[in-house]
Image (cartoon, coloured by chain):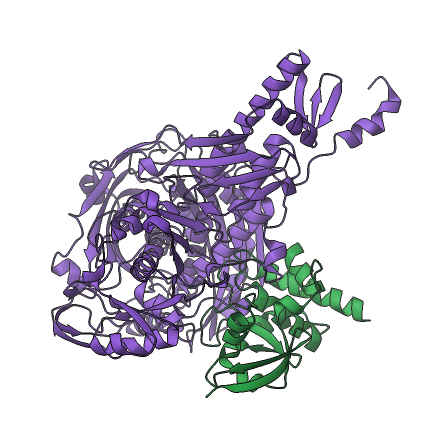
């Protein structure tokens, strides 16, 4: 039995019919073609599918699409207008905070969450907060640098 | 400059190009990765009516299939096709080197998880649900699950191999000291963040186009063709990028590509095979588990006289790349040390487990950790600092420069690297501080170790050391670059683009990196063995040079000038006292009907190897490095933490220092995971019980050492590699052996300083606790 849901995705109102078993990540990837949100482990551990739901970073592989009914969803594609980069995105690119790039969208979304929750985050805090996002290529060194730099950029631009 | 007024203009005219070699520019896809706009196979728009595949797996490690009733599967909702071994149109074979690996089990299953049949359905949920409806009867057969059982049953993939030189027997018996010991080293899952995935699209004439996350498009193409029973020209493989590979997508990707291709061909519909994490970890091969035994003799300085290694390598049920992996474990049994009298015996154990495969280091890490354990054992036995013993055994000049496979080491810089690192980190002071800490703390103990790496660069299978490239210069001066290498995050594409930019002297953003494609460059080797930039960089340079030479000929002829007055620089071509922009020149050449496209080819010179005698020069050169690791353990819980790491590593003249530093850092942390937290556990039925990140722990951000310093060693490759750079993919992985050695040092501090703790790898809290208890029990017995 399909259900109708209304939500906002990257600033646009979306009304769709979904199966009650449909995961939010599949809804985003398959129904809305927002494939920047990746699936790494399917079980809420690796963080590659991290998106923002009502401003909070969440893992989209363990939320049902129907649970997002009425919510405001932000994905990696909605962070900045076409051709521009959000400060956290720019920081990841500039500080070599990526190699294969598969974990990057989730890292960026989590990074923004860290910046908002801990505007003065030190390195230890960033490392702890990143524990739910796995990267297999880097040693996290440049990812941590990028989150720190992105946090500074965000704080500067918001102050 | 005689005319001062010309100076500013000349300076701006000659601004260096952006993104030439040696510049630390960002990854070519960085701006796309951060925007979620870099497409992986699973992100490509799905063709209409595309099918999703699911593989049903064997629940037994070894069994005969006595009956298989798939009627209910076929009739299940959404199912379009069910594929068994009998449905494979060509050969039911996916063996990369030997034909001993059935694509789908044919009457017999050889490991727990072996794919038995495949369901193609409209959705992955339907495919998975349908697979569960199969009625299969098995007659369970005896299974060999471990190295010990395989060795006892003499279950080997090939007869035991032996490599060596000198008179080991005499040397073992004559030296003042002799020790023997043993080390168990577990395997490792690749845990690439993007799991295995292939999308096959049927074309006209029965052709198939396969998008795959693979490090080896050419082999995949050939294997898919064999499985389909068609010629290789009927199969095209395309790879834009992988979400990590690490060796796990060298041979393993072919299984899923071939099954997707069979489904596509059978149904006439596109078919995607994407594994979820659990299935990926169960079905695909891993780093080889190994048992290493040693018998060593040495003098009072700890200098080795004779040494015998026995390496038992767990290969799994089929050969895959295991023979070459086992060979490389032998090649690196010396690591950076001269072994005057040496014998390395290698047993390639065939077991009823998943067929193990390539993984960063390719057997090298198992070889290296073996000899590093020997160094620690000698040091403890003699009561010497382990670094002193290591330094006493390093390769040196003439007389101490021949490897167990008889290759002379001519580019040795390891004494310099170790000396510099020792000085830079103030090793003696650090050692004293660790001793003081341990004296002051009862429940926490620190350990310190400085270990070297010498890693041989080249595929040890000679014919693989070749590469091709294809370069087009369009009439607007923009460049299309293609080569046989694949991008898995290691930065190969940006490095090769920098080489081409440098050659044409144009900004790197004028060079478009394009997807690896078997229709553009054929018969390529895997992007493996750290060889990607060495091989493809040279091939791309050759292609660019061919085009450049045509342009030079064209200018010389059209302007009536000698060639030595033509110079490419700063996006321009200087011709005598004049210049034109590169773009204008290209357009002019196009109008003059000059060919602006070329292939390029490279083969590594001066390498040879006789596998029967295990002698020769398998490696073109060696890459070197060393790491100092400091750790702390909790004696009561066995928990550990890496506190500080200092690395000095040789990449020759770096093509891109930012990319190389990333490889060193990432390789080290991955190696640290292998030796500390990553534990593969199987049960008595051979069923993998650690098949998700919930139970299989790769390092997370907070595991990184608090202090982590990486420095590139100033060096140049003595061989004529691409811009005198050195390969960087694998060597740094083995720097992490310093972590394991430091953990051993920490545990050993609980004893009287001479006891060797029985610490295996990985050094999980349980393993550390076992080693701690063994040492303290020995203390209590007073026999330490």
Q: Nearer the viewer, residue B239 or B696?
A: B239
* B780 to B400, vertically: above or below: below
Q: Residue at x 25, y 76 (%)?
A: B73
Q: Colour of chain B?
A: purple
Image: B507 above or below B665: above
x 14%, y 57%: residue? B155
Against B120, residue B734 (above or below) is above
Q: Name the residue rendered at 39%, 45% in the picture.
A: B529
Report whether residue B216 is seen: no
Name which quarter of the figure residue B37 lies in.
Answer: bottom right
Image coordinates for residue B320, horizontal then vertical, percent: 26, 52
Quarter of the figure with residue B283 = bottom left
Location of the N terminus of chain B (image quadrant): top right
Q: Colour of chain A?
A: green
- Of all residues, the one furthest to the right in this rendering is B5
Q: How many numbered discs?
A: 0
x and y, in percent, of residue B752 in the image: 37, 64
Image quadrant holding the C terminus of chain B, namely: bottom left
Q: Position of residue B504 (x, y in %)?
A: 61, 31
Percent x, y for residue B80? 31, 70
Q: Nearer the viewer, residue B484 or B685?
A: B484
Q: Is residue A11 left or right of residue B608?
A: right
Near-viewer residue (B325 or B592): B592
Q: Is residue B311 left or right of residue B336?
A: left
Viewer can see residue A146:
yes
Q: Nearer the viewer, residue B86 or B606?
A: B86
Q: Residue furthest front?
A: B204
């Amino acid at each position: 039995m399909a259900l109708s849901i209304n939500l906002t995705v990257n600033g646009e109102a979306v009304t769709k019919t979904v199966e009650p078993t449909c995961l939010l990540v599949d809804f985003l990837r398959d129904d809305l073609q927002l494939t920047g949100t990746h699936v790494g482990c399917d079980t809420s551990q690796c963080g590659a599918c991290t998106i923002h739901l009502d401003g909070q970073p969440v893992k989209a592989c363990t939320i049902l699409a129907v649970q997002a009914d009425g919510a405001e969803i932000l994905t990696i594609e909605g962070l900045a207008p076409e051709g521009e980069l959000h400060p956290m995105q720019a920081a990841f690119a500039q500080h070599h905070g990526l190699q294969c790039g598969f974990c990057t969208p989730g890292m960026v979304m989590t990074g923004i969450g860290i910046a908002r929750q801990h505007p003065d985050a030190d390195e230890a805090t960033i490392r702890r907060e990143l524990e739910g996002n796995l990267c297999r290529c880097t040693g996290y060194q440049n990812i941590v640098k990028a989150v720190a730099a992105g946090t500074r950029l965000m704080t500067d631009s918001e102050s | 400059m005689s005319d001062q007024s010309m100076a500013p203009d000349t300076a701006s005219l000659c601004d260096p190009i952006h993104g030439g070699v040696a510049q630390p520019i960002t990854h070519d896809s960085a701006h796309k990765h951060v925007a979620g706009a870099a497409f992986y196979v699973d992100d490509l728009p799905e063709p209409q009516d595309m099918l999703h595949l699911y593989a049903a797996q064997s629940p037994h490690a070894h069994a005969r299939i006595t009956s298989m009733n798939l009627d209910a599967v076929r009739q299940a909702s959404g199912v379009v096709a069910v594929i068994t071994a009998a449905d494979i149109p060509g050969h039911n074979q996916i063996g990369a080197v030997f034909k001993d690996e059935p694509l789908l089990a044919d009457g017999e299953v050889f490991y727990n998880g072996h794919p038995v049949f495949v369901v193609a359905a409209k959705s992955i949920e339907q495919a998975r649900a349908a697979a569960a409806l199969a009625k299969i009867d098995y007659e369970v057969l005896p299974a060999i699950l471990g190295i010990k059982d395989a060795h006892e049953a003499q279950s080997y993939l090939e007869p035991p191999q032996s490599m060596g030189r000198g008179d080991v027997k005499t040397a073992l018996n004559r030296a003042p000291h002799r020790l023997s010991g043993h080390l168990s080293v577990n395997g490792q899952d690749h845990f690439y963040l993007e799991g295995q995935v292939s999308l096959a699209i049927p074309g006209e004439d029965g052709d198939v186009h396969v998008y795959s996350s693979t490090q080896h498009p050419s082999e995949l193409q050939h294997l898919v063709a064999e499985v389909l029973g068609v010629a290789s020209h009927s199969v095209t493989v395309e790879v834009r990028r992988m979400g990590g590979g690490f060796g796990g997508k060298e041979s393993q990707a072919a299984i899923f590509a071939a099954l997707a291709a069979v489904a596509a061909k059978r149904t006439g519909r596109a078919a995607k095979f994407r594994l979820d994490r659990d299935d990926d970890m169960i079905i695909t091969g891993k780093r080889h588990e190994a048992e290493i035994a040693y018998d060593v003799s040495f003098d009072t300085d700890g200098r080795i006289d004779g040494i015998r290694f026995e390496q038992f390598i767990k290969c799994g049920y089929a050969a895959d790349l295991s023979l070459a992996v086992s060979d490389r474990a032998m090649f690196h049994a010396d690591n950076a040390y001269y072994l005057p009298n040496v014998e390395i015996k290698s047993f390639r154990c065939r077991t009823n487990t998943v067929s193990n495969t390539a993984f960063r280091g390719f057997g090298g890490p198992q070889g290296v950790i073996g000899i590093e354990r020997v160094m620690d054992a000698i040091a403890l036995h003699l009561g010497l600092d382990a670094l002193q013993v290591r330094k006493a055994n390093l390769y040196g000049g003439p007389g101490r420069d021949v490897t167990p496979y008889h290759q002379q080491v001519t580019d040795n810089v390891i004494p310099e690297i170790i000396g510099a690192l020792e000085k830079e980190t103030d090793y003696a002071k650090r050692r004293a501080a660790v001793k003081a800490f341990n004296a002051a703390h009862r429940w926490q103990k620190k350990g310190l170790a400085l270990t070297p790496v010498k890693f041989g660069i080249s595929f040890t299978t000679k014919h693989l050391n070749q590469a091709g490239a294809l370069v087009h210069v369009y009439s607007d001066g923009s460049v299309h670059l293609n080569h046989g290498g694949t991008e898995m995050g290691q930065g190969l594409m940006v490095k090769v683009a920098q080489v081409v930019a440098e050659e044409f002297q144009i900004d790197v953003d004028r060079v478009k990196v394009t997807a690896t494609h078997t229709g553009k460059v054929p018969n390529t080797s895997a992007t493996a063995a750290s060889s990607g930039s060495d091989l493809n960089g040279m091939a791309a340079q050759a292609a660019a040079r061919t085009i450049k030479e045509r342009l030079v000929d064209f200018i010389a002829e059209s302007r009536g000038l000698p060639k030595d007055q033509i110079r490419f620089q700063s996006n321009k071509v200087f011709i005598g006292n004049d210049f034109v922009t590169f773009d204008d020149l290209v357009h002019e050449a196009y109008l003059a009907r000059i060919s602006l496209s070329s292939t390029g080819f490279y083969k590594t010179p001066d390498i040879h190897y006789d596998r029967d005698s295990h002698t020769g020069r398998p490696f073109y050169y060696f890459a070197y490095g060393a790491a100092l690791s400091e750790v702390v353990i909790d004696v009561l819980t066995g928990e550990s933490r890496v506190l500080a790491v200092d690395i000095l590593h040789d990449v020759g003249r770096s093509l891109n220092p930012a990319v190389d530093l990333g490889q060193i850092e990432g390789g080290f942390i991955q190696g640290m995971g292998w030796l500390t937290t990553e534990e593969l556990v199987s049960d008595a039925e051979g069923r993998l019980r650690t098949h998700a990140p919930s139970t299989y722990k790769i390092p997370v951000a907070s595991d990184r050492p608090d202090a982590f310093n990486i420095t590139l060693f100033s060096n140049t490759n003595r061989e004529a590699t691409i811009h005198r750079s050195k390969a960087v993919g694998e060597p740094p992985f083995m720097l992490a052996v310093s972590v394991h050695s430091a953990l051993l040092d920490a545990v050993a501090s609980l004893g009287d300083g001479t006891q060797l703790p029985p610490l295996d790898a990985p050094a999980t809290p349980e393993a550390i606790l076992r080693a701690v208890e063994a040492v303290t029990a020995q203390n209590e017995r007073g026999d330490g």
